Amino acid sequence: MALDNPPYQHDADSLLDIEKTWAERLAYGGRFLWRDRSGVLGIIIFLSVVIAALFSPQLAPYDPLAQDLRNNKLPPAWNVGGTWEHPFGTDNLGRDIFSRIIYGTRVSLTVGFFGVLIAATLGMIIGAIAGYMGGRIDSAIMSLINLILSLPYLLFVVFIAAVLGRSLLNVILIFGITDSPIFARVTRGEVLRIRKSGYVESAISAGARWPRIIFDHIFPNLIGPLITLATFEMSAMIFYEAGLGFLGLSVPPSVPSWGNMLSNGRKYLTSASWIAAAPGLAIMYTSLGMNLLGDWLRDVLDPRLRRSRR
Amino acid sequence: MNPLLEVRNLVTKFYTLDGVVHAVSGVSFDLQEGETLAIVGESGSGKSVTVLSLLGLIPTPPGRIEQGTALLRTPLGQKDLLQLSKAELRDVRGGQIGFVFQDPISTLNPILTIGEQIKETLTRHLHLSAEKAKAQVIKLLAEVGIPDPEMRYKAYPFQLSGGMRQRVVIAIAIACNPHIVIADEPTTALDVTVQAQIIDLFNRLRRTLGMTMIWITHDLGVVAGLADRVMVMYGGRIVELSTVDDLYERPQHPYTAGLLGALPRLDSQETRRLVSIRGTPPDMLLPLRHCPFSWRCDYASERCWQEIPELTSTAPGHEVACFYDMEKGGLRDG
Amino acid sequence: MQRYFLSRILQSLVLLFGVVMLVFFMVRITGDPATLMMPRNASPAQVEAFRESMGFNRPVLVQFWDFLRGAVVGDFGNSLHFKTPALQLVIQRLPATLELATAAMLMAILIGIPLGLIGGFNPGSVLDSVARGVALLGQSVPNFWLAMIMIIFFAVRLGWLPSFGRDEWKSVIMPAFALGLSTMGQIVRLTRSSTLEIRGEDFIRTAYSKGLLPLTIYSKHVLRNVAIPLVSIIGVQFGYMLGGSIYIEFIFSWPGIGQLLEQAIGWRDFPMIQALAIFTSLAVLMLNLLTDAAYMIIDPRIRYGAR
């Protein structure tokens, strides 16, 4: 309610407020972390996934490809017949599921990271053009983007993947290109807002040069919403990659990826349900962490974004 | 006869993450039947919170009314607004006390017709049938000066200008012939010319309906042609309470004087000039130990930093909470 | 308003043309559509004969013109697998998918909206935590995984529900829930956040100052405003479900267009995939227009062109 001095709206500012020093920003982020404990959880989960990807050879107890047919379909350690030598059990070829889950982070994070990188770069270019040109060009680009975003995304991804064939590069390219409209939409919105706000004009009239304006004014304002969006989109890409893998359309079947594991596990659903359960839990864990992280980032970096996600 | 509304020692606080905000700290005033009382103060002085507290309209949490009484005279005797049950309060709101809020753009529901929004007050309190209510709404629309009321009945808020929307809000407030109409900065968001029209409308309604009114504003200029008495608030307290004429002629509180921009110079030259009050409004997070205005006051002395001045009568119908006597130019006795 | 609709229809047609183009050139992006569509062990002579029969040896623009002409009248060629018109096969499978998506949407709406409202009206309460939990789960649980886990529990272990097919009314429960969960999460999230927002609006304070009953305020003033953003998300999510049904129909052997797509990929039946892509896009674009119309009904600001 708008009282004439709303006493409880102190946090309506942003971490990337230009007038803040870095120490203040750190303190601000810390305060938010303390208030929003789920943000801490998100960061911990995300970091654990990143560490698993970086140090897979050190962390994984087995070679993820090593087959051991005598010990195939071993249940997880806590089930009857399971051993702690294979904590999550083994699959139909006797490969250690725990090790494969750890190596699977590499595929997921690679697809997520580079996919988002490409999508963000393309999207920023398109969005900046639309936001900068304004007028007819802008509204044409934007209404087209909105329509593209309403198309059955998955259907096209599956179609394109089926044509291009199974490879990591193809998957990254598909997600990078098809996801760029979302980044374009956010970039365009921000560019419009910055242009309207008038401080770019005042900077120009104060004699600032364009590189300065871009780096001092436009970029700091863009980076908050884009980082938040990138977190959510990376989570979505990890999701979709697993989905493609499940249909047998992502990385080659020999690569230990969560999607491939799920696809393989489906065949043994009744006899060895853990083969499919483990990668699903891994996806959930990662996605949960990134969503918590994204929610927290959204609150810290840009309160305005709180309700404008697609 | 008792006053229509008698507020005593109202205290409202907000318990926020950053601490306790002392929004209203011990406000007492009377409202006589038929009069218009203006409550003046800057943002955060507690003027809106005061009236919102009376009707339980502050957001709780974080807000909480800590103490006080607010006796409303009704045909059935006095009742304390702050002690009423939720259901009883709902009968008072809109029925016995009408509200006009500041921004007519956001105070009307954007997706309901204005007719509907006026009508629901009528059916809620007067239990009119649909046709009777509609006829009454059209009468009300005409009364607040909206042309073509039959046609406008089906209009949506966004189809009306700001001034017209504020007239609709006023129609809602007066729909059930309330004892009191509370107007919270009703002209602030409007153009100057429209402001004048709305003030005219209020004056006319006051005469024709014998309306009792509380008018909240930060603009002393608006008050002159409208109010009978003025209550100046600062830092959640009343600093001066007086009739309009007396207040304009002889402001007793340095803050009021500052608001009037007619601060008498110490060299006692009667040059009227615009003076801005230096400093910023007080931090409402701190419990008050001394005069809230002492930070910004040119006349603050030792005592002002040690005690909170009480509201005391200096002339008939004129009360002020200040140790300094502006007319004598020195500390008051006592 | 009419101009608005006309321009929307025009944009949709432009996009549909884009889809047709994409679908046509996509199968040629690797260079040779004939090798793409033939089984890997086909002999060069077989591939050559196939190329001849499909007309892939003609100039690309001539092929595109033919494809476009066919697309306009709904002719996407024959399915390579069934040897019958592709579109006909798609349309045959449509009712099953519509049934699944409708059931999923109903589930998402009937659970999601009340949960979001409760959460939005009582932020911080136990039920609000439930609402936020559902929203988070909807975002993080992969539906293909959920589907498998549900089969293990409700079909294999407990034997309550059938694990595949579309034979009895119980068949739809698991697939619909799996397909609808993420939509449910989105609906909870949006309902909750917009309820919180609307609740704090000035006009709600006005409604309180009129002495209206809480039930009136919630149903008349809050709910109707909350419904506006919900309409668009429901439209978008329905489109998403048509795509997302591929996993669910595959896992539950649900005989709809999702399963058809999955099968077509296995058969390398690209004419069928092309028909599916174009037809589904058309359906989604029409759905968008319907959403626009629904917007006009509930939001007078759009009806009168004020926004």
Image (spheres, coloured by chain):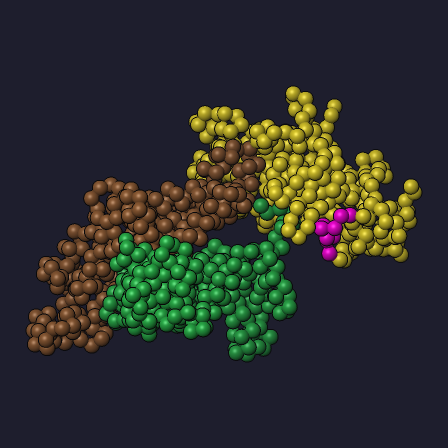
- Front residue of B166/C140: it is C140
Marks counted in the figure total 0
Q: Position of residue C292 (x, y in %)?
A: 34, 51
User: Relative to A253, is C297 above or below?
Assistant: above
Name the outermost residue toward the top: B76
Task: Indicate yes or no whether the magenta region holds residue B282.
Answer: yes
Q: Which residues are magenta?
A: B280-288
Judge from the rendering whether residue A38 lies leftward or rightward of residue A288; answer left or right.
Answer: right
Quadrant containing the N terminus of chain B is top right
User: Relative to C118, is B265 above or below?
Assistant: below
Judge from the rendering whether residue A299 lies leftward or rightward of residue A7; answer left or right.
Answer: left
Q: Position of residue C287 (x, y in %)?
A: 29, 52
User: Relative to A162, is B153 above or below?
Assistant: above
Say which colour chain A has: green
Q: Position of residue C210 (x, y in %)?
A: 55, 34
Say which colour chain C has: brown
Which residue does the image show at 49% across and 42% down from the upper left?
C127
Q: Position of residue B113 (x, y in %)?
A: 45, 39
